[in-house]
């Protein structure tokens, strides 16, 4: 049997990237593999060994991509990770310019980027774009793509290179229900000609076309097993907060500078356009103190744009009739006057946050809405940081540099950062991206318990209805404008 990728007793040359034991794996032709494990298990480290990104000590990975193909892994293996949409140098620029259409930076459109990357004739490209439903995205600058649209863009870009092996990190995060179904069908069809390796954190995200599963935990790699064997095993029950942890949240004192208005957010006839594209059209929406909203809609419907107006990130807010905390935007308040009331986390923040400070300092930066930690914090502030570090299960990671953490661990750090100042308004845009089941359960319990306190207001975006806390009492559904 043809072994497309084989590693025997593989040990990373650099100690920082070593698994707990030498790695042995053979991925054979016809196999479709899922790499499954909790946050921080070593899944990304394992993928880097498979792709040759991290060289091995005293041996090397062996590849057989078939006749007529280059033997180089970089020519035949494509790896899609959520953070890589704009390239390593673009993250901070993206976060600053996502909403600032007056900026002089010229971003390529999705179509231009795909044209530069792609192989095949026009008919082949059109068929792929039709299958992914991205024709409507081709004239959009990539900086304007929503997180779900970016996933489609990345997949198209990788497939146009005609890879022999396609590795996708958490392929379904950020996608609405309909798009997840389309992507699952597309991947099942691709499996007839491409070896797929899906990196997932949840059992539910392992598709039926997968033939084999590799489980990783604590940087230990279990022997490859069939999908049937994997599904026959009983999963560990989800574990949320303990009663004592819930009591710690509920016992937090009310803040002396709590806002004193019943209207938290008010949009009146708000319209947002970028060029000829309408994102929001005459939107009327009010969020009142103590309400808990679910913000729903398909990819590209304008959910993140709406939240950028609330969070004072989008300069178009000054041209709209918008009140925040009972005050009209543009009447003299500073961006910091707005942000000090808001705890915020989003896919955009995750992609752009690249400060390599200790995780505890990243959490503490949320106290003053800074990217890094630029002032000495008080003893009371350190106590608040310690509380949320403990609640999110980050005590063992507090001193670790942020960029050495796994993507799931980084998301937990940014979630703790959103809570640390005990905000009156929580804005959570896809907060559970990439979290495993235990961490998802814990984070959901934290949100639910936090919202039981007086005057706490929530606006949450998710494409998974089961992720919404039970306290949700209002829903705004946005429709995508063609």
Image (spheres, rainbow, N blue to C red):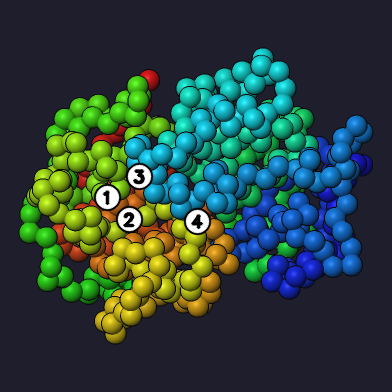
Residue denoted by label 2: 344
Q: Quadrant of the C terminus?
A: top left
- 392 shown above or below 92: below
Mark toward the start of the polypeptide (3 vs 4) = 4
Residue 147 in picture, x, y percent from top left? 46, 41
Res 479 quadrant in image:
top left
Mark toward the start of the polypeptide (4 vs 2) = 2
Res 243 quadrant in image:
bottom left
**Secondary structure found at label 3:** strand
**C-alpha span from label 4 to label 2:** 17 Å
Q: Residues within 10 Å of mark 1 (few under 14, many from 20)?
A: many
Residue denoted by label 1: 311
Identify the residue shown where x is 48% and y is 71%. 357
Residue denoted by label 3: 461
**C-alpha span from label 2 to label 3:** 12 Å
Counting every numbered tag in the picture gives 4
Q: Which numbered dot is residue 435?
A: 4
Q: Residues within 10 Å of mark 4 (few under 14, many from 20)?
A: many
Residue 307 in picture, x, y percent from top left? 29, 44
**C-alpha span from label 2 to label 1:** 8 Å
Q: Residues within 10 Å of mark 3 (few under 14, many from 20)?
A: many
Marks 3/1 in contact by CB < 8 Å: the verdict is no
**Secondary structure found at label 2:** strand
**C-alpha span from label 1 to label 4:** 24 Å
Marks 2/1 in contact by CB < 8 Å: the verdict is yes
Identify the residue shown where x is 15% and y is 62%. 454
Question: Depth-wise, is mark 2 or mark 1 nearer the camera?
Answer: 1
Mark toward the start of the polypeptide (2 vs 1) = 1
Question: Depth-wise, is mark 1 or mark 4 nearer the camera?
Answer: 1
**Secondary structure found at label 4:** loop
The residue furthest top is: 123
């Amino acid at each position: 049997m043809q072994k497309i990728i084989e590693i025997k007793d593989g040990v990373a040359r650099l100690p920082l990237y070593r698994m707990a034991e030498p790695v042995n794996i053979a991925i054979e032709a016809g196999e479709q593999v899922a790499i499954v494990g909790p946050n921080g298990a070593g899944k990304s480290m394992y993928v880097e060994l498979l792709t040759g990104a991290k060289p091995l000590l005293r041996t090397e990975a062996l590849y057989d991509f078939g006749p007529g193909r280059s033997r180089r892994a970089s020519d035949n293996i494509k790896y899609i990770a959520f953070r890589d949409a704009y390239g390593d140098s673009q993250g901070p620029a993206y976060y600053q310019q996502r909403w600032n259409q007056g900026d002089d930076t010229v971003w390529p459109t999705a179509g231009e980027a795909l044209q530069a990357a792609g192989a095949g004739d026009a008919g082949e490209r059109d068929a792929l774009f039709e299958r992914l439903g991205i024709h409507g995205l081709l004239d959009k600058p990539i900086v304007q793509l929503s997180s779900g649209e970016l996933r489609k863009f990345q997949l198209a870009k990788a497939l146009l290179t005609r890879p022999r092996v396609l590795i996708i990190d958490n392929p379904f995060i950020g996608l609405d229900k309909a798009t997840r179904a389309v992507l699952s069908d597309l991947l099942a069809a691709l499996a007839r000609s491409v070896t797929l390796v899906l990196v997932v954190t949840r059992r539910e995200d392992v598709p039926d076309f997968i033939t084999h599963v590799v489980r990783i935990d604590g940087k230990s790699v279990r022997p490859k097993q069939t999908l049937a064997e994997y599904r026959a095993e009983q999963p560990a029950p989800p574990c949320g907060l303990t009663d004592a942890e819930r009591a710690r949240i509920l016992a937090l004192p009310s803040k002396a500078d709590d806002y004193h208005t019943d209207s938290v957010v008010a949009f009146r006839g708000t319209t947002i356009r970028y060029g000829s594209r309408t994102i929001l059209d005459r939107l009327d929406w009010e969020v009142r103190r103590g309400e808990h909203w679910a913000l729903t809609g398909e990819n590209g419907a304008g959910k993140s744009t709406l939240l950028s107006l609330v969070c004072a990130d989008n300069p178009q807010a000054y041209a709209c009739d918008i009140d925040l905390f009972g005050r009209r935007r543009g009447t003299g308040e500073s961006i910091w006057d707005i942000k000090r009331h808001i705890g915020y986390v989003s896919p955009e923040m995750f992609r752009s946050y690249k400060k390599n400070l200790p995780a505890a300092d990243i959490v503490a930066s949320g106290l003053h809405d800074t990217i890094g930690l630029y002032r000495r914090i008080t003893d009371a502030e350190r106590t608040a940081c310690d509380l949320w570090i403990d609640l999110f299960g980050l005590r063992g990671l507090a001193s670790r540099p942020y960029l050495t953490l796994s993507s799931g661990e980084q998301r937990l750090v940014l979630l703790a950062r959103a809570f640390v100042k005990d905000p009156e308004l929580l804005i959570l845009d896809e907060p559970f991206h990439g979290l495993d089941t235990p961490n998802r359960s814990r984070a959901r319990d934290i949100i639910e318990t936090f919202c039981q306190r007086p005057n706490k207001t929530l606006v949450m975006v998710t494409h998974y209805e089961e992720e919404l806390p039970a306290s949700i009492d209002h829903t705004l559904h946005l429709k995508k404008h063609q």
